[in-house]
Image (cartoon, rainbow, N blue to C red):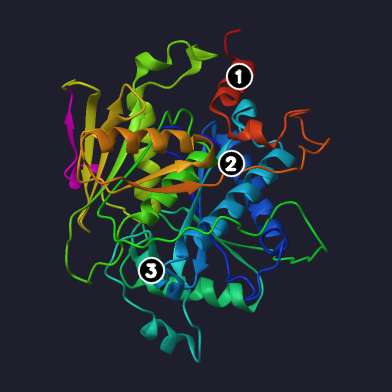
Amino acid sequence: MSSAGGSRPLWLLLLPTLPREITPGTIRSFYASTISQVLQKAANTSSSFQTVTILDIAVPCNASNLLQPFYYSGLQNLLGQLYKLICLLCAEHSIDVQYGNDVDVRVLLFKEAKIEGPLNETVQAVEDDPSIGPCVSLRRLARCGRPWQRVCSTDGNDGEILLQLFLRLRNEAVDDSKGKIVIERFTLEPSYPASTSLETPATNVQVIREHHNAVAVGGTFDHLHVGHKLLLSMTALVLNSNVQPGIKAKRSLIVGITGDKLLENKKFCEYLQGWHQRQAAVQSFLLAFLVVNEPLQNLSSTMDEKKEGSLGRIVMNSLPSGIVIEYVEIFDAFGPTITNGSISALVLSAETRAGGKAVNEKRAEKQWTPLDIFEVDVLDSAEPIPATSDLGTQDFRNKLSSTEIRRRLAKKPGTAD
């Protein structure tokens, strides 16, 4: 599920709160039917308009959990399972860049609202959270001004109340009269199988013991897929969110993006995205996840094309919340983690944990404080791609591989052999 540039259809799916008791299979059994319907319709739109539809899926989370030191593992479990489900559903329905019907899915988090009493009273009671991402109030989500052309929700009482509350909150601040939003309701058909391999209990519980004001992550980020999106989301969640309302405390989210020269020997290199294209895709996703809707020219974006040492091009976004996102071109495995002493945490995938150890060894040589390392579980599944899918024998992991995405682009009709 890659990202493409240009003007693209922009949809929002509002999901209701999960049942309180989360058991294995709950994510799939509760959300799969709705997400599947919306994905297929979005894929048809992508095919018809020969572009990539953007689908923002907004899922509620318990705000009180964000105050707990264990929230990292809980939210990683939630986001990971949702992205895993999305990946499986795309495979089941042959939604893929290879077929020209790809959908760029982005999971957003909002604080669940207590809906009690008449709707008018609930609207007034919804928290007006002044913060920006990564988990915002429903009021902030509704009023962010993002130009969704279609808002999807679930049928049933809970889905309808959430939709009407969202629309009331949005109408307070956003004028959609020039581009009327299409409202569409989809069936919510929960089913509760005895077991499924989609979900597994979290075994590696990670605790955020310190407030981190500078967090780093690194990667190639070629043809941004759900594995990248989970990694970037968790990086934003590690960043210190313990900031008093109205106070703009500077926080840095530093993304190291591999330089083009290091990728020249990659398979299907002719389909590799250039550094600026990869940086733009990462930027687009992060600004969406942080619920930022300011035009780029209003974000104090700057670029430094100088190449010094192990670092190259740098693009910076200064957000109204005080968060500064730095996209740094890197030419080795360390990047800014050994040149910027203010970084206190590193987020990486479990399969690259050796890289975190190497970084801390380099920092020790400088007598710097070691980084807190946060691992993001590798998305995987024992479930093969269904035989009904045109993807044939490709397994789940192929949907999470930039190399496989490039290979499928090479097979796309109309591209050169």
> Is 302 part of what is drawn in magenta?
yes
Q: Please report the residue visible at 62 percent of the width from the left and 22 percent of the height from the top.
A: 408
- Quadrant where the C terminus sits is top right
Question: Residue 364 vs residue 74: left or right?
Answer: left
Q: Residue furthest top?
A: 417
Task: Kindly report which numbered mark, 3 or 1, lies closer to the viewer in this rendering.
Answer: 1
Residue 281 vs residue 225: left or right?
A: left
Using a 10 Å C-alpha cutoff, classify the residue at mark 1 as few (fewer than 14 neighbours), some (14 to 19) or many (20 or more). some
Residue 254, horizontal then vertical, whole percent? 29, 41
Disc 1 on helix, strand or loop?
A: helix
Place of residue 316 in the rendered image (x, y in percent of width and height, measured from the top left): 21, 39
| Most distant residue in the bottom direction | 117
Q: Earlier in the sequence, mark 3 or mark 2?
A: 2
In this picture, residue 11 sits left or right of residue 26 = left
Q: Residue at x 28, y 67 (%)?
A: 242
Residue placed most toward the observer, 378 or 12 = 378
Give the residue pinned by disc 1. 407
Please say whether residue 78 is visible from this viewpoint. Answer: yes
The residue labelled by disc 3 is 170
Magenta-drawn segment: 295-305
From this view, report whether residue 85 is shown above or below residue 275.
below
Distance from Cα at disc 3 to Cα at disc 2: 25 Å
> Residue sitting at 76 percent across and 43 percent down?
383
Badge 3 crowding class, 10 Å Cα cut-off, few under 14, some 14 to 19, many 20 or more, is: many
Type of the residue with mark 3: Arg
| Residue 290 can be seen, yes or no | no
Precedes in sequence: disc 2 or disc 1: 2
Residue located 44% across and 54% down the image = 148
Q: Amino acid at mark 1?
A: Arg
